[in-house]
Image (cartoon, rainbow, N blue to C red):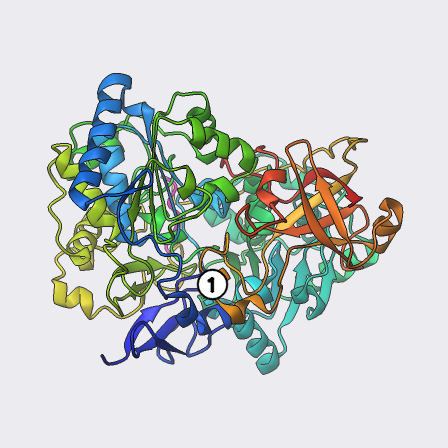
């Protein structure tokens, strides 16, 4: 087989790859020099993709309990359980929990099936844990979930602010592009993060903001720009609506940053109009994540630093297809193609899908969905390509919920994830390199993932599995035989986005043939600055949203520390794939709790020893790494380890508190304690 151009399986950078299949399932991976996301660059995870596509641990056959079953028997049972549940308990008793690992075509079918035909919007995605607050902030500010810039803006900027992003580890190819731009034209880099991460070490300025201090910090910057006369009054007058007196009334708020550091930051912001602010999970994974996003966007709108080369707020997504998922409606609070639940929008979607039972209102977001599973309101849940028994906050509760649910169906590539172990029916899904479809990266670029090898065992594409179940339930509109047919239908559906004044427009692909689809090269919908011609609110103006810093929570004497969580450079999610690679395991072999030296003394911890981290939700053991990169009073743990991989079960520790607008959980600021073991 000749080399195949495809897209990396992991993060939202969306790097192009040239994969050369060899003997058996061997793969040689190179960066695709022609792909505009990476121009040939790769990080360690992309480079070693070939180590993670073997058959070790794969789910090869449909399983009913511990018994191997045929596809027909398994699909009949899924359809019967789902149909019975709908008939006896109504559509709201059914839910799908899906993943940013799914391809856009999979996501499209899942949404169409549940929202259009079953009649519930109880479909949410693990992207809720990743970037739902950025979506909500975009919707509030722009009237649509649009990222207003590109990676090229990062390279053209004179000043880059990274907010809550350890870019060097979490989006390494973006980091490489930033580093190259700094070298080429001396762009300044500021990292706003409570931790002195590897990224912060390399910055011109590290701003160690207090946990959830970002809103106060950006409001303070906005006040500073106002006081220096640097607001762009002309831009605001022409393009923005804002609350009366919001800007005039802004005053200094406590952000926990040393005044000298703040002064240096303000100087850089004042001096550099070409400024991009990249914000990521450190901002989003917060109980005030939406307000943080709007605080960032406010600064750009008020200073006119948006919709132009080298300037804009930029949300960096975590997963390879978080963007594609939200475009087709993968979140419970949207329909599809950026449409909401107004009567007009619902009527358009009903007509397009010929939907017999379009859902009337938004469904349950992830945390509430698992609460409903726990208390029996949801009796049938289908989990696809994700491991919520580990990755959700209060993961012990989620495990209990799945354990008591009447029917749990899991579509997976891996046989024995923590979640798959709780399933009644397991369906083998095609993995990366086997499946075929599209993904959208953080800058709205759509790329193809392509088939490189035969499916493992009897694995099938997620879209095909769902279409087979839909037909068994008697629903029309699911007679697809190729992902290109699904993409063409989705592209045609984006006419509804255009009709309702939105930007998401793929109508040029509405009549694409399978040959066109197979020949697709990466393209960015909306061009470079899609909001340049006006924002998506009815009046064409953006909204500056009045946001206020949250009140500092009282210190809980039993849990006096602030727990922060995040990822390691070479691991991905719950390590079901990256854990298979010996090379990727070298970087960090075990989960560490990073502790400031003063806290190590205070709690009697020694570097290299073990400690138990506890919160009101659970406890888990980690090896101690004493580090002055932590702020005193704050500790950091990684997110990847599971019950199956041993200690370091971080999901168990995290509170299930969520942002009131976006429903995104707050993984970054949890009351905790620590003790040696
Ligand atoms: Fe893959 Fe992300 Fe690394 Fe690119 S930066 S190779 S998309 S993991």
Which residue is tagged 1? 580
Q: Majority secondary structure of the magenta segment?
A: loop
Circle 1 Cα neighbour tier, 10 Å, few/some/many (<14 / 14–19 / ≥20): some
Q: Position of residue 61 (x, y in %)?
A: 26, 50
Q: Position of residue 368 (x, y in %)?
A: 47, 29
Q: Quadrant of the N terminus?
A: bottom left
Q: Position of residue 129 (x, y in %)?
A: 50, 44
- For the point 22% across and 46% down, the residue is 465
Residue situated furthest front in the rendering: 67
Q: Quadrant of residue 431?
A: bottom left
* Left or right of residue 564: residue 477: left
Q: Is residue 35 visible?
A: no
- For the point 28% across and 79% down, the residue is 3
Q: Is residue 15 visible?
A: yes
Q: Quadrant of residue 343?
A: top left
Q: Position of residue 275 (x, y in %)?
A: 58, 63
Q: How many marks?
A: 1
Asked whether 285 or 307 is in front, the reply is 285
Mark 1, secondary structure of its residue: helix
* 393 in magenta: no
Decide if ligand 1 comes within 8 Å of the CB at mark 1.
no
Q: Quadrant of residue 203?
A: bottom right
In this rendering, the answer to whether 390 lies above or below 531 is: above
In this rendering, the answer to whether 228 lies above or below 367 is: below
Residue situated furthest top in the rendering: 88
* 534 in magenta: yes
The magenta-colored residue range is 533-537
């Amino acid at each position: 087989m000749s080399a195949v151009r495809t897209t990396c399986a992991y993060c939202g950078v969306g790097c192009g790859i040239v994969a050369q299949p060899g003997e058996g399932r061997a793969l040689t991976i190179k960066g695709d020099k022609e792909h505009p996301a990476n121009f040939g660059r790769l990080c360690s995870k992309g480079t070693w993709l070939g180590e993670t596509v073997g058959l070790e641990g794969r789910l090869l056959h449909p399983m009913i309990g511990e018994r191997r079953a045929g596809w027909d028997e398994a699909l009949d049972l899924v359809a019967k359980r789902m149909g019975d549940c709908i008939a006896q308990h109504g559509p709201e008793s059914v839910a799908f929990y899906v993943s940013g690992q799914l391809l856009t075509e999979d996501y499209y079918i899942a949404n169409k099936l549940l929202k259009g035909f079953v009649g519930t919007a109880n479909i949410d995605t693990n992207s809720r844990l990743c970037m739902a607050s950025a979506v909500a902030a975009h919707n509030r500010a722009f009237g649509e979930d649009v990222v207003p810039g590109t990676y090229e803006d990062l390279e053209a900027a004179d000043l880059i602010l990274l907010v809550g992003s350890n870019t060097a580890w979490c989006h390494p190819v973006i980091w490489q592009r930033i580093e190259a731009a700094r070298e080429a034209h001396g762009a300044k880099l500021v990292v706003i993060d409570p931790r002195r991460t590897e990224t912060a070490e390399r910055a011109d300025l590290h701003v160690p903001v207090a946990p959830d201090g970002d809103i106060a910090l950006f409001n303070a910057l906005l006040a500073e720009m106002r006081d220096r006369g640097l607001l762009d009054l002309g831009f605001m007058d022409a393009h923005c609506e804002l609350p009366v007196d919001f800007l005039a009334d802004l005053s200094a708020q406590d952000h926990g940053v040393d005044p000298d550091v703040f002064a240096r930051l303000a100087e850089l912001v004042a001096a550099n109009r070409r400024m991009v602010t990249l914000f990521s999970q450190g901002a989003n994974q917060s109980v005030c994540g939406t307000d943080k996003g709007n605080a960032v966007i406010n600064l750009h709108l008020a200073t006119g630093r948006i919709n132009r080369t080298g300037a804009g707020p930029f949300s960096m997504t975590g997963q390879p297809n978080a963007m594609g998922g939200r475009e087709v409606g993968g979140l419970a609070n949207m329909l599809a193609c950026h449409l909401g639940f107004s009567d007009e929008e619902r009527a358009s979607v009903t007509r397009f899908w010929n939907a017999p039972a379009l859902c009337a209102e938004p469904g349950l977001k992830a945390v509430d969905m698992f609460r409903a599973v726990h208390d029996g309101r949801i009796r049938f849940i289908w989990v696809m390509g994700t491991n919520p028994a580990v990755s959700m906050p209060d993961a012990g509760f989620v495990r209990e919920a799945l354990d008591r649910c009447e029917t749990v169906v899991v579509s997976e590539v891996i046989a024995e994830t923590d979640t798959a172990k709780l399933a009644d029916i397991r369906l083998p899904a095609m993995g990366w390199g086997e499946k075929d479809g599209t993904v959208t990266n953080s800058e709205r670029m759509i790329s193809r993932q392509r088939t490189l090898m035969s499916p493992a065992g009897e694995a099938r594409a997620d879209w095909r599995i769902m279409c087979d179940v839909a037909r068994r339930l008697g629903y029309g509109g699911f007679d697809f035989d190729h992902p290109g047919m699904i993409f063409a239908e989705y592209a045609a559906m984006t006419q509804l986005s255009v009709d309702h004044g939105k930007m998401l427009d793929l109508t040029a692909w509405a009549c694409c043939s399978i040959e066109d689809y197979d020949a697709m090269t990466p393209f960015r919908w909306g061009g470079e600055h899609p909001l340049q011609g006006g924002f998506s609110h009815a009046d064409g103006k953006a909204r500056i949203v009045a946001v206020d810093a949250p009140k500092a929570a009282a210190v809980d004497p039993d849990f006096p520390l602030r727990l922060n969580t995040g990822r390691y450079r070479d691991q991905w999610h719950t390590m079901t794939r990256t854990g298979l690679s010996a090379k990727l395991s070298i970087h960090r072999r075990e989960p560490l709790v990073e502790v400031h030296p003063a806290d190590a003394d205070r709690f009697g911890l020694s570097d290299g020893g073990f400690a138990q981290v506890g919160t009101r939700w659970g406890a888990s053991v980690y090896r101690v790494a004493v580090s002055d990169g932590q702020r005193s009073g704050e500790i950091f743990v990684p997110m990847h380890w599971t019950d199956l991989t041993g200690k370091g079960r971080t999901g168990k520790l995290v509170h299930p508190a969520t942002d009131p607008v976006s429903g995104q959980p707050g993984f970054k600021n949890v009351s905790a304690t620590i003790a040696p073991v």
